[in-house]
């Protein structure tokens, strides 16, 4: 036998050995998989509350009278618990919401509900921008798997039209008739009413379909230590001729983005920076770019559609101005800003690599959780409404003339609250509604809206007025003031039929422009074409009926009768 | 029961499975494609709109851009994968130390979940801390906008896919090469043919059927490219890396425009069938030398 053949023979494995090794491999893999499964079922340790005030707020949910000096805060929660009684004990309610926030939030408070009613609550979380699609999948198939569906307000009418959402009016009438008419101190604050002017919150074709759970305005976050540094203030004033302060308009914002740009080795507030430092961290990735654009668009007086004809106006002078402005400001930001989603932008700011940041209210809580921010940032975060425009187009459309916005007006806040809905296919509608009532009640929501891992933003008077809320973390009062201001000067998401599709088409083309795949005008013209096609497919009359309700918000600040002063404690 | 009846009975489960999971969805999709099916038409009962969905698709510049993106990517990634697979296969037909240990390692990429690959390579291409960005910056002295610029983003997808699927080509071609008759090549070398001449005139022609099959399988699979663009670029920037499958996914599952999604799916089916037919016919026409036999 040749050497190579002998070697080959020696390398051949007997059948018995092969089976032995194969069985051993299967056992090892099975043991590994079993161990992984076991460890995955062990619940994670409950994070220790921060030293600031989360524990105070959690305690306050169960002993509210010590915080608010009133029994009224418990009224709605008590009604829900009493109405449920023990009749649904053993029932498991299923909810669909945003991951990871809904499972985290509801997981924290659900034990109280279980203790009071015997019902358990199971939450499935899906990524933010797939919530509508997941809900539609369930609705179209009539699975009835979910009792409670979390949604973004711009998707609400789609879910209703798909037949998946139950009108809440009979349940509100039965259990708590004044749910949306309660005023201060515990009712929903005006933001809820401004979304659908002239009607109670979240009504569609005369019926109420949701309860707000999340305010969701945008806020301007900034580094108080940098803005307050005397050296930086002097340098800014000598270069730009006016004091360094939170930007009120886009010109000031542009100056500050340019000013704060530092390269490694440059000085920043008396210290040398070791990595690129930027004036701002902004979200311009897919699903986020359009919200950034809308800050500019609405503040320039942009209106999405003509309310009489539903002709898209997105590619008009305001849109072009807005997109050009956005790109101008981008020139001072990181080169890859068009890939920044919420996490990337948040991390850049919380990691101490930028001087400002714009995002939803959730960031205010995250930025004050010591575990989530760098030492340089912790305790040094300020809050303000988003910058606005000195150059606001006035337009007479459909007989409604826009009200010019002066420099003292802040930017129009693009906003779209998160809502909680009752599934039409639920087999436990009363029980589910009572849970919805309970979790959005003033007392329980004091826990959920101030949870650092929760995405729910203040949406009731008491969230703003309570002493516990205003001392929740450093500058909490300023945070709440910024949210309040934002929510009274808004331009809402395009919440007509297929609203998510309109917004996504805008998102895609904004990205095409800012990455220079297309010119600004071409990109916006494509948006207009896409929007016109969607409107034609859905039916212009159907869209008009919904859009005309929202239209007043686009053309003017909130009417005076809806403007209410920030509630004091 | 006769033999024929027994035969039909035995294949009946397969026929039922095919009917339920292949034929019915196919024909139901075709049926849906003639209706306006989206959430806003649920209550009005999905109106019949004839060929409007198809007309809308062929009138949509994004549809054509997605098609172009798909073929552009498929052409380059399949070509590069073939070349890499060929080089690796040639190398691994020779004996060398640790060959048996290295071969399984080389095929690991095909076993990794594509979504995980897309996510990992997204980190690699990230401007500030990605390893590929770092290497690119070091080599060129400039920041390469991998995921920011449409052209670079396209090549980022191609690079990722090449990493993932070159081992498939390698395995196919290696299997083909090891099954080739050695006598022909040995005879050519005895007659004075160089290694290169042997490869071009003997090995390649004999390998032609294997190459064609590998290209066909890989091309059809690549035409459905979805998971890597989804994770790496989200079809962006804008729609510059949006493939046709991604386009259909957006319409069908994100926009919930199911009638339109069904229509574009059928258009894609037609395109793939035409491509496959042309490919096979072109492959049949390709002159093959039977290695001197």
Image (spheres, rainbow, N blue to C red):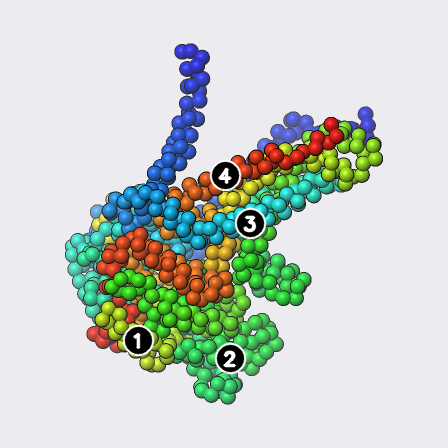
Identify the residue position indicated by label 3 in the image: B73
Q: In the image, which is nearer the foreground, mark 2 or mark 1?
A: 1
Q: Residue at x 56, y 76 (%)?
A: A262
Q: Which mark is residue A259?
A: 2
Q: Residue at x 36, y 68 (%)?
A: A316
Q: Residue B18, image x and y in percent?
A: 42, 30
Identify the residue position indicated by label 4 in the image: B274
* Among the 4 quarters of the image, the one containing residue A105: bottom left
Spatial CA distance of label 4 from label 2 is: 58 Å
Query: Is A280 in front, or is A446?
Result: A280
Give the number of callouts.
4
Residue ranking furthest to the top: B2
Lateral position of residue A365 relative to residue A347, left or right: left
N-terminal of the pair, mark 4 or mark 3, is 3
* Among the 4 quarters of the image, the one containing residue A468: bottom left
Mark 4 crowdedness (10 Å alpha carbons): few <14, some 14-19, many ≥20: few
Question: Is the same chain shared between marks 4 and 2?
Answer: no
Spatial CA distance of label 4 from label 1 is: 54 Å
């Amino acid at each position: 036998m040749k050497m190579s053949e002998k070697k080959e023979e020696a390398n051949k494995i007997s059948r018995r050995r092969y089976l032995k090794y194969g069985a051993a491999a299967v056992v090892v893999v099975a043991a590994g998989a079993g161990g992984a499964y076991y460890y995955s079922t062990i619940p994670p340790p409950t994070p220790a509350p921060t030293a600031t005030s989360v524990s105070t707020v959690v305690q306050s949910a169960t002993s509210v009278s010590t915080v608010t000096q009133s029994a009224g805060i418990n009224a709605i929660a008590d009604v829900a618990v009493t109405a449920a009684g023990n009749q649904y004990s053993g029932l498991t309610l299923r909810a669909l919401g945003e991951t990871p926030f809904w499972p985290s939030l509801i997981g924290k408070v659900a034990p109280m509900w279980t203790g009071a009613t015997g019902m358990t609550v199971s939450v499935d979380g899906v990524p933010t921008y797939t919530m509508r699609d997941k809900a539609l999948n369930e609705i179209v198939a009539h699975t009835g798997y979910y009792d409670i569906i979390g949604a973004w307000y711009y998707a609400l009418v789609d879910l209703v039209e798909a037949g998946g959402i139950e009108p809440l009016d009979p349940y509100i009438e039965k259990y708590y008739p004044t749910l949306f008419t309660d005023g201060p101190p515990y009712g929903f604050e005006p933001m809820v009413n401004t979304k659908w002017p002239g009607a109670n919150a979240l009504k569609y074709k005369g019926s109420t379909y949701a309860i707000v759970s999340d305010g969701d305005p945008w806020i301007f976050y900034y580094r108080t230590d940098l803005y307050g540094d005397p050296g930086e203030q002097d340098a800014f004033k000598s270069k730009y001729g006016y004091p360094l302060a939170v930007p009120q308009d886009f010109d000031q914002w542009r100056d500050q983005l340019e000013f704060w740009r530092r390269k490694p080795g440059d000085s920043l507030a008396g210290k040398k920076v070791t990595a690129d430092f930027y004036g701002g961290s902004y979200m311009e990735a897919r699903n986020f770019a359009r919200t950034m654009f809308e800050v500019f668009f609405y503040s320039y007086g942009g209106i999405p559609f003509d309310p009489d004809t539903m002709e898209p106006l997105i590619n008009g002078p305001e849109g072009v101005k807005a997109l050009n402005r956005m790109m101008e400001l981008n020139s001072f930001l990181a080169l890859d800003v068009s890939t920044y989603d919420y996490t990337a932008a948040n991390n850049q700011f919380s990691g101490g690599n930028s001087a400002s940041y714009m995002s939803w209210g959730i960031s205010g809580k995250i930025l004050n959780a010591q575990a989530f921010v760098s030492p340089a940032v912790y305790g040094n975060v300020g809050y303000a409404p988003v910058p606005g425009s000195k150059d606001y187009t006035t337009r007479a459309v459909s007989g409604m003339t826009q009200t010019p916005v002066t420099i003292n007006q802040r930017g129009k806040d693009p906003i779209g609250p998160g809502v909680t809905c009752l599934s039409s296919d639920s087999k436990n509608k009363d029980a589910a509604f009572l849970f919805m009532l309970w979790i959005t009640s003033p007392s329980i929501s004091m826990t959920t809206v101030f949870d650092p891992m929760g995405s729910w933003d203040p949406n009731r008077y008491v969230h703003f007025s309570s002493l516990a809320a205003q001392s929740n973390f450093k500058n909490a009062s300023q945070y709440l003031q910024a949210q309040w201001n934002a929510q009274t000067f808004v331009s809402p998401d395009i919440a007509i039929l297929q609203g998510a599709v309109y917004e996504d088409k805008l998102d895609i083309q904004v990205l095409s422009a800012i990455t220079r795949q297309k010119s600004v005008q071409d990109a916006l013209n494509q948006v207009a074409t896409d929007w016109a096609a969607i409107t034609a497919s859905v039916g212009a009359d159907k869209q008009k009926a919904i859009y005309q309700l929202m239209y007043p918000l686009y053309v003017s600040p909130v009417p005076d009768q809806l403007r209410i002063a920030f509630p004091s404690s | 029961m006769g033999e024929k009846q027994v035969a039909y009975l035995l294949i009946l489960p397969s026929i039922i499975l095919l009917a339920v999971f292949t034929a019915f969805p196919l024909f139901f999709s075709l049926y849906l494609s003639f209706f306006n099916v989206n959430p806003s038409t649920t209550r009005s009962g999905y109106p019949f709109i004839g060929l409007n969905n198809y007309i809308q698709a062929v009138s949509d510049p994004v549809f054509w851009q997605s098609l172009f993106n798909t073929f552009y990517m498929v052409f380059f990634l399949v070509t590069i994968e073939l070349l890499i697979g060929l080089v690796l296969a040639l190398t691994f037909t020779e004996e060398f130390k640790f060959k048996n240990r290295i071969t399984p390692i080389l095929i690991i990429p095909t076993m990794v979940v594509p979504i995980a690959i897309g996510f990992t390579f997204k980190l690699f291409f990230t401007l500030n801390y990605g390893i590929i960005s770092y290497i690119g910056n070091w080599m060129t002295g400039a920041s390469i906008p991998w995921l920011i610029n449409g052209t670079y983003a396209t090549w980022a997808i191609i690079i990722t896919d090449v990493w993932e699927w070159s081992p498939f080509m390698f395995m196919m071609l290696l299997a083909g090469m090891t099954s080739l008759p050695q006598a022909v090549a040995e005879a050519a070398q005895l007659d004075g043919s160089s290694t290169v001449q042997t490869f071009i005139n003997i090995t390649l022609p004999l390998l032609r059927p294997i190459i064609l099959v590998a290209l066909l399988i890989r091309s059809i699979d690549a035409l459905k490219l979805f998971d890597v663009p989804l994770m790496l670029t989200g079809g962006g920037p804008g729609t510059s890396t949006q493939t046709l499958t991604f386009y259909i996914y957006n319409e069908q599952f994100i926009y919930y425009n199911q009638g339109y999604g069904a229509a574009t799916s059928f258009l894609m089916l037609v395109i793939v069938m035409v491509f496959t037919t042309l490919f096979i016919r072109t492959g049949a026409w390709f002159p093959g030398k039977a290695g001197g036999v």
